[in-house]
Image: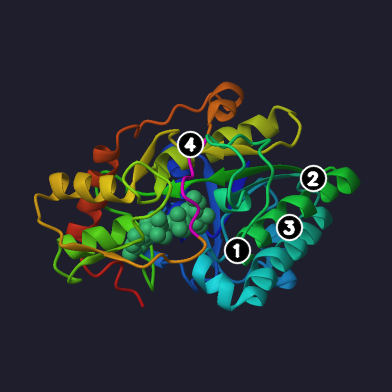
Amino acid sequence: MATLVLGGAGYIGSHTVDRLIEKGEKTIVVDSLVTGHRQAVNKDAKFYQGDIADKDFMRQVFKENSDIDAVIHFAAYSLVAESMKKPLKYFDNNTAGMVKLLEVMNEFSIDKIVFSSTAATYGIPEEVPIKETTPQNPINPYGESKLMMEKIMRWADEAYGIKFVPLRYFNVAGAKPDGSIGEDHMPETHLLPIVLQVAMGKRDKLQIFGDDYNTPDGTNIRDYVHPLDLADAHILAVDYLKAGNPSTAFNLGSSTGFSNREILEAARKVTNKEIPAEIAPRRGGDPDVLVASSTKAREVLGWKPQFDDISKIIETAWKWHTLHPEGYQDK
Ligand code: UFG
């Protein structure tokens, strides 16, 4: 049996492929390489370059690999700010892409899919910590595109019996501890890589977007989770579906919040660098606090995150950045 990983050359996808291979699982990767990196894909995975919305291409992948019995789907665009400017790009690639994928999966009777959803589906959360039952009211097209994907899958389950698990990630940070794979986005917009780029002297200073939020130090609070812990959660979710369990969603976070200032301070300690920073205006669309309740994933999937300490997470990211100051260098 084989697992098909869509978007397996991306940040979280590549860590999941690595973990699957480590566990001795046959793994097939599809990635368009629009944002992913070929070098990030473990050499023992079978690789196809192509677009998941190209039905003929995907039919060929399923035909050539008749042992595929589950799909893990990471192949989506994920920049909140870009989605505000180009919403149709997100509804086309993420949402319409999912429709085409499900059509082909149904043709080939593949009935299990685990997919990357996001805390952005909750918008400004009505309660913190956020539970899976907290109402989902996204405030940007990115979150909306993922919520639509969740809804489409519900009806595909009803009609065709395709079982699904959306995993709603909070803020992903860190890299494989040996520094061989890590985070390489172009452009980079995320807090921790930017902080570490300042530490390396690749940027002058960090701008902290707003210090007048409703939090103890005035800066936003986020919940950081390591990509290898996410990888484990995906593998557990596939096992959960293979055991015949019903479709359901899980939040994935560490359940501990850190403010942007706390991340900066922790990074100063880990890197032993000054990391100049200034307060800048709010970025827009940033909720005060996003912290997960991940009780359901722990209880139902038996998920036990290994990277439960923010300094450990930052250390792994720092190792990746110092070993690969220019990222993967394949673009
Ligand atoms: N921030 C700064 N300066 C920067 C970059 C970020 O102050 O240069 C702040 C942001 O304003 C925010 C925090 O750092 O308060 C985290 O921002 P990120 O851009 O790193 O992450 P987001 O919380 O905006 O979004 C991430 C993912 C989304 C996902 C969300 C869920 O990018 O896809 O987490 O929590 F939906």
Label 3 CA crowd tier, 10 Å (few <14, some 14–19, many 20+)? some
Label 1 CA crowd tier, 10 Å (few <14, some 14–19, many 20+)? many
Is residue 243 visible in the rendered image? The answer is: yes
Count numbered badges in the picture: 4
At x 56%, y 48%, the residue is 119
Depth check, mark 4 against mark 3: the one in front is: 3
Residue type (three-letter) at the residue carrying disc 1: Tyr
- The residue sitting at the right extreme is 159
Viewer-side residue, 198 vs 257: 257
* Above-or-below relation of 328 to 69: below
Task: State which region is magenta.
Answer: 286-292
Query: In which quadrant of the rendered image does the C terminus lie?
Result: bottom left
Viewer-side residue, 130 vs 55: 130
Confirm if mark 1 falls within 8 A of ligand 1.
yes
Please name the residue that numbered disc 1 is placed on: 142
Query: In which quadrant of the rendered image does the N terminus lie?
Result: top right
Depth check, mark 1 against mark 4: the one in front is: 1
* SS under mark 3: helix
Please name the residue that numbered disc 3 is placed on: 148
* SS under mark 1: helix
Earlier along the polypeptide chain: callout 4 or callout 2? Answer: 2
Please name the residue that numbered disc 4 is placed on: 232
Residue type (three-letter) at the residue carrying disc 3: Met
Tell me the CA gap for discs 1 and 4: 25 Å
